[in-house]
Amino acid sequence: MSHDTVVFSARNIITMNPSRPSATHVAVRDGRVVATGSADELCASGARLDDRFKDKVLMPGFVEGHSHIMEGLMWLLPYVGAFDRRSPEGRTVSGAPDIDAIVARLQEAEAKLPDDGTILYAWGFDPLHIGGKMLSRHDLDRVSTKRPVVVVHASFHINNVNTLTLERAELLQATNISGVVAGADGLASGELQGIPARMRLFRALGHNLQAGGTTRADVDRYAASCCVQGVTTITDLHNDLNDQTIEVYREAAQDADFGVRLVPALASASHPPEQAIAKLDTLRAHAGDKLHYGIVKLVVDGSIQGFTARLRWPGYHNGAANGLWYIAPEELPKLVLAYHRAGVQLHIHTNGDEATELALDAIEAAQLAHPRPDHRHTLQHCQMADAAQFKRMKTLGVCVNLFANHLYYWGDAHYELTMGPERAARLDATGTAQRLGVPFAIHSDAPVTPLAPLFTAWCAVNRTSSSGRVLGRDTEALTVAQALGALTIGAAFTLKLDHLVGSIETGKFADFVVLEDDPLTVAPELLKDIAIWGTVVGGVIKEAPRA
């Protein structure tokens, strides 16, 4: 090996390469892995030894297969979720445990805004985390009656607003519009669900927080969060990809110091198929080692905890009405066929099992009409799928990315309210996917839940809710090694990037997470507590900030 080769030593290197699952040294040249092995094997030909990680553990950098650039944007806004979160600077932001605490935090933020009617946004709220208490327009009127106040739910499928906002959107008395929840007084309560109500809200405000142009600062905060959590490849899995965003992504990806590989997915709702397909062809010219295009995202239903997901019989455990179709059932097969025929990879949001069935039907029809090997269409979330549906995925060549974090954050709600004990026991059925050989990953959907792959792995291994309730551990839990695989080579496979990332082996990018302890030797219940020193991306070392 030449003197341009650097050999990193470590206490252990978990490679995720079954041909050589562990090593003590890894050789890197030109941003790629030359080989793994021992010091004698790799240092014999003039390579330079770097032993700064000699007491640490290296793994392939985590691949977050379902997250959003909003993780970079939302930290500019007040956080009002119930659970503590970690910021891109590595700082712990405390949760707000009740309505009064939420109002107080919003009042503090409102006092810092200019008196010009600027919209006050906040994020992270979920009534299920504070005993089912709803955040009403009257609560938000305590924050302001002179400016719009808009709280985005943790699911990003629901908003709560104050009375002024309802009046501007002409929704206060419009409880006949789908998604406008009525209060006890017969007027709108302030909760807006689903597309019709929320689109009317966004038009009235002249602004949609979730569809604006991305800035370089947003992307840099996203990358900073990745470094803190050991992520070296990350998605932005639903973006209109307007001209501003495309240029920002291109600029960031060309920066040698940019510390993550980015995989955006084009939102299908923003373009008809023929335009989206043409746009993807154009976008590939902007691609590079740190920027990968090619995915279109379809959203079929809403969220289970928000009662907007589509469930098969017997429906919601508490008797709530079935959820919403975000794409009409008769339209989905047409969309899937158009993209499938064009060679586009689809990532399809299906939370409820009825939505999953519809998506599988559409993929099956597309395959029959236009057989295509190795399409790797991926069902995202897919939280209620049963064994029969996983068998269909296997037969159809479909991948799945399961929302393991839900087990902790909403496991109790699913057990008690949405699914009941039996279905909740197979929530995010990673064990079934593993047994049946369905290619799978696990994810955070950040900022819906925290970007924290070791925590996601902990959820899949321990299957414990926030109250300590165990959900299907005997049948659906992963081993630690399986969970780590789902966050590295498994996630890379769902993105069609497993030839570049996801394992530490010859020819792949030198992307590592640097850990203070070995996840394969610590007790499984301590997996989430392993400290992350930082990352290596293309051979460039990034130490995580410490708050």
Image (spheres, helix red, strand yellow):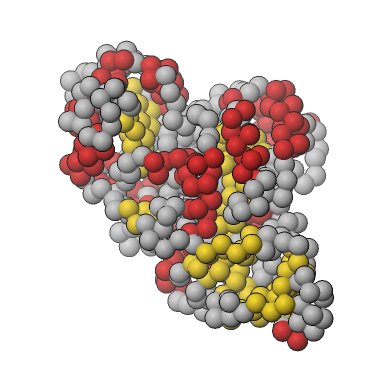
- Identity of the residue drawn at 69% across and 40% down: 293
- Identity of the residue drawn at 79% across and 80% down: 46
Instruction: Tell me the quarter of the image containing the C terminus.
Output: bottom left
Q: Is residue 281 above or below residue 20?
A: above
Residue 92: x and y in percent read 34, 57
Decide which of 115, 91 is in the foreground and name it: 115
Asked whether residue 199 appears in the rendered view, the answer is: yes
Q: Is residue 127 left or right of residue 86?
A: left
Q: Is residue 186 left or right of residue 408?
A: left
The mark total stands at 0
Residue 464: x and y in percent read 39, 61
For the view shown, which residue lies furthest in the bottom direction?
A: 40
Q: Is residue 149 above or below residue 367?
A: above
- Identity of the residue drawn at 55% across and 77% down: 56
Residue 53: x and y in percent read 58, 76
Decide which of 106, 129 is in the foreground and name it: 106
Decide which of 436, 258 is in the foreground and name it: 258
Q: Is residue 19 above or below residue 291?
A: below
Asked whether residue 457 appears in the rendered view, the answer is: no
Decide which of 179, 416 is in the foreground and name it: 179
- Identity of the residue drawn at 72% across and 77% down: 48
For the view shown, which residue lies furthest in the front direction?
A: 3
Instruction: Tell me the quarter of the image containing the N terminus.
Output: bottom right
Q: To which quarter of the image does residue 171 belong? A: top left
Residue 359: x and y in percent read 61, 36
